[in-house]
Amino acid sequence: MPETLTPSGVLEKQGPLVLFAFFEPVAGLDRFQPAGFPEVGHVIYKAPRSNGALENVCIVDSAASMANHLEMLCMRGAHDYELVDDLQGMPYLRCVTGELEDGKLPPEKREVVVTSLTEGHRIASTYFFGNRPKKTLKWDGKGAQRIKDDDTLCDKSFGDELAGAENFGIRLDGNKKAHPPADKWWNVFQTIFRYDPNALVHGVLFPQWQIKIPRVLTAHLEAFEASRVDRSGVKFDRLGKTTSGQPIFPVDDATAREIRATFILDTALVRSFGRTNGKTPLGLTQGQKEFLVALALWKIRRLCETPFRFRSGCHLKCARLADDAGQEVTLDVDIKSAITQAGFEDPRVTDIFWPREELYRAGEEEEKKDKETDAEGDINGANDAEEGE
């Protein structure tokens, strides 16, 4: 019989929880497409084994890529930024824009651009934190303001709110050596959990404040006894509107004896997010820590319960989920109950406003390139026109 794992039971484990998910291509296919890089293709390395042999191992997806896949499972679709039904009530951040009306932006007028579940830096993304020039490290005053309950904007950036005494308690804000005092780290965990608990699961970094929280859940996908399959693709330009013609390009696929995802859940790190000092609670409560474990297990279960398309040529299904002892396991997660017991406060969704003209303006490097291109165009425009004809 498979062993049943629950969030509370996993959190009690002294060592990390290690799970292996064994995948295979859908439709009985032999080939699949690993993550690759231009002019390099996918990575196959030789790993030493206990019998002295070397085995070809292919990196199908890195830890960063797997985090992206796991976060994608929280949304209704690749282009639908609403949470799935299971996760309704879990806090997250949205970057929104729209036309202000008398200094207000009502919910029906807000246009969602990105969320903390789609951005690589999560709550630490510039979309939420605000733009801070390297010379001053001060907010430039052009966006990243939280929309309050009355639909008006805060008079400072959300990043400055996070740095405040009631949250991170950052000392020497604006200085490269700024950091939270030791006794404020409990506030750091509480604040991140209140706005974006997913960031604690997958890790978050505020380099300017010396805040680095590693991943609670680390995952990677590898293929063993792998072989490279070289094939080609071709691009057709039927209307002749581009200069590329009809190029043929290389495509790398792979075959393997086994495709295996490894999940490592650091329970000690979760426990470090909160404790009691006598009768005084510090950091996260037990229910909040159990929620982080529940969210991690929910993601693993959701990834494994139905076929998942890691990329266009890598559609895999899970055949078996086991622990590091080889024992088959099932994950018993009541995520809705975990959300209730975590004690999240309203509003669950925090909207961060950016003016449209700031959100979509070119960056300094792009502006510089545009100016250089315009200057070159003034000099060489006639020649370009002649060549084009």
Image: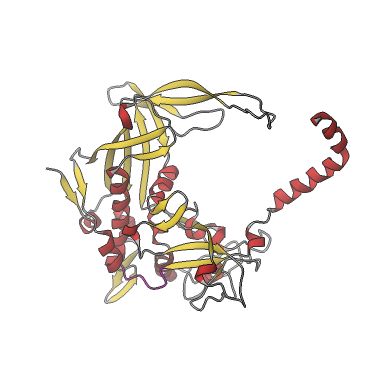
Nearer to me, 12 or 358: 358
Residue 343 lies in the magenta stretch: yes
In the rendered image, the residue lying farthest to the left is 1
> Is residue 102 rendered to the left or right of residue 233?
right
List x then y, in percent, for residue 186: 39, 68
Q: Residue, x 36% and y 44% (percent of image)?
A: 219
In the rendered image, the residue lying farthest to the front is 239
> Is residue 76 rendered to the left or right of residue 142?
left
List x then y, in percent, for residue 309: 39, 39
Q: Residue, x 83% and y 41% (percent of image)?
A: 377
Compared with 251, 135 (above or below) is below
Residue 290 visible, this angle: no
Image quarter hosting the C terminus:
top right
Nearer to me, 53 or 66: 66
List x then y, in percent, for residue 49: 31, 26
**Which secondary structure dominates the residues rendered in magenta?**
loop
Q: Residue, x 43% and y 47% (percent of image)?
A: 68
Report the colour scheme: secondary structure
List x then y, in percent, for residue 79: 47, 51
Compared with 273, 317 (above or below) is above
Q: Specify start and end residues of the magenta stretch as a single range.
A: 341-348
